[in-house]
Image (spheres, rainbow, N blue to C red):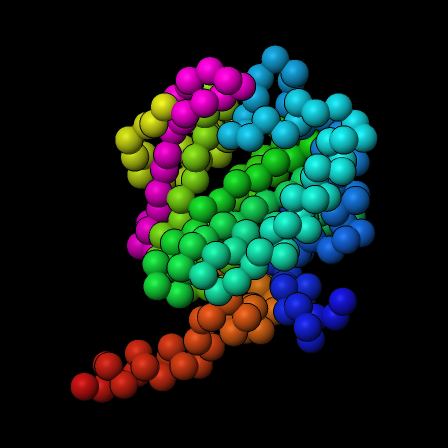
Amino acid sequence: MTAAIWPLFDLHVSTPRLSLRYVTDDLAGELADLAAQGIHAPETMPFSEPWTDVPPPALQRDAVRYFWRCRADTTTECWTLNLATRHQDGTLLGVCTLSAEHFPTTRTVTTGSWIGRRFQGRGLGREMRQAALHLIFAGLDGHTANTRAWHDNVASLRVTKSLPYTEQRSVREIRRDRPDTMLAFTMNREQWQTIRRSDIQLAGTESIREFLGMPPHLAISARTSAATAD
């Protein structure tokens, strides 16, 4: 399938350390195999849905089904964008996910991610998050970015707390069939502006804005100028 039919295939976010691209069928298979090599210690579960508890090859098949399902369910009213993350040396690292409902109205996106276990502890999670935030706020003109993590997910919480999020009320949710505490955080555009970087590049955002029901940047600039003139 070409980007002319599915513009998300042209989406590209790059930083000095890594890049994010929409998950193609080939990348889905590579990511499924990477996940099967391990994302976290067996005794813990960082995800709301314990999909990594399934043994291979069912784990890989479920992962590919998930990527396909997200693609098939993409509409202007509800979408989940899975972005494969590669190191600048070409090594596949993991996935960054952006999800939204009624985005043209709410301008709110929730982020999630995972990195292969052998690549963790190098600051790549924070770099991935900043790339995702740049896409949300600079590329899609988002107003709010949300993220969540279990109370004991030290790595994820370290990334979140290193950035200007505001912590919300915690909630109790089911984790491996038992109730546990989920922490929630939110960041608005003004907070993001305090850590906005000039070394993150975006490509393909104009075509995906139209695809996701957003006006082009030029239209927004024109409205802003008119409002200023009034």
User: Residue at coordinates 74% horizontally, 47% vertically from top-left?
Assistant: 28
- Seen from the viewer's position, the closer of residues 111 and 76 is 76
Above or below for 121 versus 200: above
Q: For the point 31% across and 39% down, which residue is it?
A: 166
Quadrant assignment for the C terminus:
bottom left
Is residue 15 or residue 58 the one in the foreground?
A: 58
Any part of residue 191 in sight: yes
Q: Position of residue 135 (x, y in %)?
A: 51, 58
Q: Quadrant of residue 146?
A: top left
Q: What x and y, as percent, mark residue 205?
A: 56, 68
Whether residue 192 appears in this view of the structure is no
Instruction: Using residue 113 as the reference point, say whether residue 228 is left or right of it.
Output: left
**Magenta residues?**
173-196
Look at the picture and state if 95 lies above or below 45: below
Q: Is residue 33 left or right of residue 160?
A: right
Closer to us: 204 or 23: 23
**Eyeballing the image, is 156 above or below 100?**
above
Please report the residue visible at 57 percent of the width from the left and 22 percent of the height from the top: 45
Q: Quadrant of the N terminus?
A: bottom right
Residue 187 falls inside the magenta stretch: yes
* Residue 82 place in picture, x, y as percent: 61, 50
Identify the residue at image location x=74%, y=70%: 2
Q: Residue furthest left?
A: 230
The image position of residue 74, as x and y in percent, is 56, 59
